[in-house]
Image (cartoon, rainbow, N blue to C red):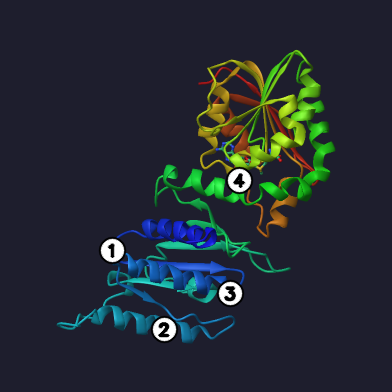
Amino acid sequence: MDGAARRWAEVLDLLVEVVPPGPAGVIVDSFDGHSRVVADRLAAALRAGGRSCARLPSTGTPGPVSAGMAGLRRAQRLAQAGPGAGPRLAPTPLLQQALVVADGPQWRAQAPDGGWTVVIWLRTQPPAAGADRSAGAHVVIDLHDPGWPVIRHVDAALTGRDRWYLAESRAFFAARAATWDSRFGDDQPAYAAAVAESGLPAGATVVDVGCGTGRALPALRAAVGPTGTVVGLDVTPQMLAVAGPNGAAATAGLVLADARRLPFAAAGIDAIFAAGLIMHLPDTIAGLRELARVTRPGGRLVLFHPSGRAALAARHGRALRPDEPLAEGPLRISAVRAGWQVVHYDDPPDRFLAIAVRTGGE
Ligand SMILES: C[S@@+](CC[C@H](N)C(=O)[O-])C[C@H]1O[C@@H](n2cnc3c(N)ncnc32)[C@H](O)[C@@H]1O
């Protein structure tokens, strides 16, 4: 099996696992036609796993809603008849009978009684205009590269995070490591400005958590000087492999580890720098708590991104939601619960910068 086939197999394995046993309705949705292919593959994987599954016909885009309803009824009859039929079952709502897999916005809009059990959103190139349908999805798959699907979110109610998070996060960033600096290299001055603004004292011990290719490490070294200590930590080996030859390793130590379980003693670090990390952690408060655990009281947390939240959301074709972890209100609340006090919050289009001080925890 080649790399892409293995990746698809891993993703489908996980999807099969998150579809609950018994009657269920699964809808796959996306901006483009990929939802049809993914729904076909999922239905095949479910059947291969021994689940009896009706694949509702794709209505295509656009297509009459009534054609979709006819498909639903056909699937209902099919599911009620069952394999080998036996005595005919009395008509009952679809989801009391069957496992169905459908795709596309038209099916999504015609949820069966009780709603779709699993809504899978495929993140692909957004159209120039169009409604963002990612909200409410139980599973989000990044499919910008159809040969390399990566699961980016699974509702906690469907499966434990440890089942999918680490492997999928690494798969996502590993595929991007080699071109990261050529795509985003122009941001370097923004990192230097954010570090300068963060007021890190000379001689401090600072860890760049989720350091990626090490873009912030030279600026962090410049801030803490030769007597300070700079560590870059990341969970993706391919990112750290790029960081080394870049020269980042010359100014900092590099550590392969998970931000959710940092290999540091409690209260030993003066400052944490984290650029583009928090939104990738599956549990914001738990993540902030672990960062707090290793930071001394009075120490700093610097959260940065070289684009503002609105600009980043627009680039990804999604609407900005007020309940996102890095929105000012939610971040201030999570920070307090995790042992931080936000003392600076700045979110213009060209950068995101929030600074928090370690308060000593709960
Ligand atoms: C958006 S990139 C940002 C990289 C770098 N900070 C930058 O600004 O260029 C997010 C990075 O966080 C890393 N990451 C994601 N989850 C992580 C985790 N649980 N622990 C450590 N690193 C993680 C990824 O491997 C990736 O390198």
Q: Is residue 313 above or below residue 350?
A: below
Q: Amino acid at mark 4?
A: Glu
> Secondary structure beneath disc 1?
loop
> Secondary structure beneath disc 2?
helix
Mark found first going from the N terminus, 3 or 4? 3
Mark found first going from the N terminus, 3 or 2? 3
Please name the residue that numbered disc 4 is placed on. Answer: 324
Residue at 39% across / 71% down in the picture?
A: 44
Viewer-closest of 96 and 179:
179
> What's the CA distance linking mark 2 and mark 1?
21 Å
Q: Amino acid at mark 2?
A: Gly
Q: Residues within 10 Å of mark 2 (few under 14, many from 20)?
A: some
Mark found first going from the N terminus, 2 or 1? 1
Q: Amino acid at mark 1?
A: Gly
> What's the CA distance linking mark 3 and mark 1?
28 Å
Picture coordinates of residue 81, whole percent (x, y):
24, 82
> Secondary structure beneath disc 4?
loop
Please name the residue that numbered disc 2 is placed on. Answer: 71
Judged from this view, the residue extending furthest toward the left is 87
Circle on res. 33: 3
Give the foreground label among 3 and 4: 3
Mark found first going from the N terminus, 3 or 1? 1
